[in-house]
Amino acid sequence: MRFGKTLKQSIYEPWRDKYMDYSKLKSILREDKPDDDDEPWTEEDENRFCDEIFNTQLEKVAQFQEEKMQELRQRVDAAFDKLRDLPPADAENKDKPTDEALAQRLKDLEAELDGITNEVKELQKYSNLNYTGFLKIVKKHDRKRGDRYKIRPIMQVSLSKRPFNSEQGYSPLLNKLSLMYFAIRQHLEENAPAEPYHLDPESQPETHNGEKYTAYKFWVHPDNLLEVKTYILRRLPALVYSQQSAKEWDGDEDPTITSLYFDSPNFQMYNQKVDRETEASSLRLRWYGQLSQKPDIVLEQKIIHDNGTSEERKFPIKEKYIKPYLDGEYKMEKSIQKMERQGQSTADVEEFRSTADAIQDYIRSNKLQPVIRANYVRTAFQKPGDDRIRVSIDTDIAFIREDTLDRDRPCRDPQNWHRTDIDDSNMTYPFKNINQSEVSRFPYAVLEIKLKEDNNRKRPVWVTDLMASHLVHPCPRFSKFMHGVASLFEDYVNRLPFWLPDLDIDIRKDPQVAFEEEEAKRAHRAQNEQVVGSFLGTKLGNSFKPSRSSPVAKSYLAERVAAESSGAKAQTPASGITDRTPTGITPAGDALNGSSSSQQQNGQQQGRSDYGTMTLSSVFPGFSLSKYSKAMRLKRAQREGGGRRGSVTLPPGVEEPTEWIKNSGPLQIEPKVWLANERTFLRWQHICVLLGGLAISLYTAAGRDTVAEWIAIGFILTATFAGGWGYFLLHSRRQMIIARSGKDFDNFLGPLVVSIALMVALVLNFSFAYRDFLARSERSEALFTQSSSSSASHVDLR
């Protein structure tokens, strides 16, 4: 269906005049005229179109969206004031039913909230439709009239600066609505269970194997990825995948996961998920590693129910049975027979049969086929045997078309269920060997945190600090399937997901600004919960307390920019980058070696200007000015003085650490480190042999030439120094590796000595040769003069 028709069918009648005039913009582009009869596109036509779309249509939509959003906020605040004015519940008689007058007031307030909620939904649809319309019309412009001007990038920037198609502005509004609904239903419903209020309406409830989880999704910028991983690794170990899950897994690399998503030719499943319809589902085939390695393949169906929770149905299937199963020719009979031979219970067999039949009927009835592939590398974190906290980070995310919509040039062979050009060649990220118009690479990593629902257990502080930090960008309803379809099938769909505008902005945040915004949100949320809690006679959530993990007043990003700019002026490496530990997410539980970290920071601040391309520490490691060496010298001086750090008082029961965290645990050194050290030693011995051979040859050929003998002796001494220096480096660096020293390994004293010795030898050799040349020239001239005189005397005698 064309977007113009979709827009007309989706218009909300009370706001009909506030939508973008898509037909008018198409007429300005002359879309209604054939290409043969089209007149030349002039500068005046271009100015007219740009003025209409940017100054008229975009401003009209943006102004209405802002005014309507402000009106909804005022209505929500007014309803909240009404709830606040209601008499609070009596703690002693809160189980008794409410009187009729209070019940009627609550019902009226609930009806008012229903009207507000409906308008919020319509406003979201309004924003989504207009956002999609603006992108589609500028795409038409660039395709047909974009010979000289491309305005799609300008439109993307304009949309990113406005609250279009983004749920970030709706979050406070939805949170307050959710609180009021919770309070009203607790009063109106008789014998209502004391259900806890969920403080994260943006989260995604899920069900896995009968267990309920709450999922949170975030984007992570590549600049912050390592910092996030190290922060998580301090609390959760990396999950090692088994051979059954990933047959290519060797314990050194994270597994690659491939998800093959299904949809109908008209993208019915995508549209249901974008519109958030009830019972919307997604279907995919998933496997680990390369398909040529015969991995286990799982067919999964994820269903979203009316209450917002999601449920997964899945079963394993072999590769050779996938195509017959999708065509309805195979009913998983062999798998069922195998389960019966293994003696599995009748209930498990019937559950497997019903799941396989239900998914197959769903595929056949909706005419589903593979349309898109998502390929990514997953790093998982989880304690063994403890699934209360599950964290995963997906990187190197790529989306690839798998459809056969174009019958003349299908991306996939219609006779196969997957693309053989990718799987047969074991193609990996970034997939440069296929048509690049069929690939879309996601610029960020995706962080997902799943917490098992437990009313008696609080969320870990470190999880809360991570989710509120500047390192992550919240994207609660992000879906790889939806994003892949929206990025690769834009011409086939008429709705786009709300997170697309965030791809055009920099998601990195200043730590101080992010902390202040999160503190303001927490304070506002706590205030609303206090009002609702007093109305219910109970306590919702925790009372607000200023976070103990407040970052320092100086902004990290501002400091880094200032350091880089000053470093560029001085033509020296920027030294203003401080410790990359996220200051905004350091809870009190991370105070391990806290005094040591403060000591390192002090040493770092004192020695920031001591770094350069050539320092004393390069020649004399004992005089290193690095932050590590300064901290170690300060620590050694304090130990020799017999006192503990005077500025830090350790709490009771906490002892001063005796060794660095990096030095704890067993010594594990990769073989390449030893080989590199030995390779350096062999290079020095090679120089020793060359210089020694040269010296012996020179000494042998010198004869009675004293100068040549002394130069040969100098070469012998240089060769001896080179051999001794290589031996010294071999053992000194070996000791530094074993001791896990933080000192610099480079030392150019040896190369400097050898280079100076060779240069002196060359200069002396040149000077002596030049002196000999002058002496020979004088002798030749004297002989020539003498011979000339003799010839003249002989002539005179004659």
Image: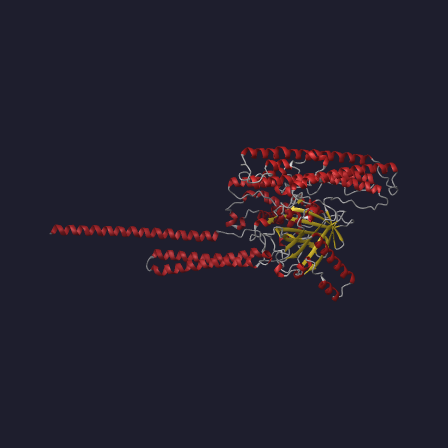
623 and 646: which is toward the camera: 623
- Tell me where residue 206 appears, x and y as whole percent: 73, 50
- Residue furthest to the bottom in view is 341
The N terminus is located in which quarter?
top right
In this figure, what is the number of numbered marks? Answer: 0
Side (left or right) of 780 relative to 288: left
- Tell me where residue 41 appears, x and y as whole percent: 54, 36
Is 363 drawn above or below residue 165 in the view shown? Answer: below
Side (left or right) of 564 relative to 540: left
- Residue furthest to the left in view is 798
Residue drawn at x 56%, y 47% as measured from the top left: 626
Is 609 drawn above or below residue 319 in the view shown? Answer: above
Colour treatment of the image: secondary structure
Q: Where is residue 347, by image quadrant? A: bottom right
337 and 74: which is toward the camera: 337
Can residue 70 be seen from the camera position used here? yes
Side (left or right) of 330 relative to 537: left
582 and 643: which is toward the camera: 582
- Tell me where residue 545 appears, x and y as whole percent: 74, 41
Can residue 462 be seen from the camera position used here? no
- Tell me where residue 425 appears, x and y as whole percent: 57, 58
535 and 425: which is toward the camera: 425
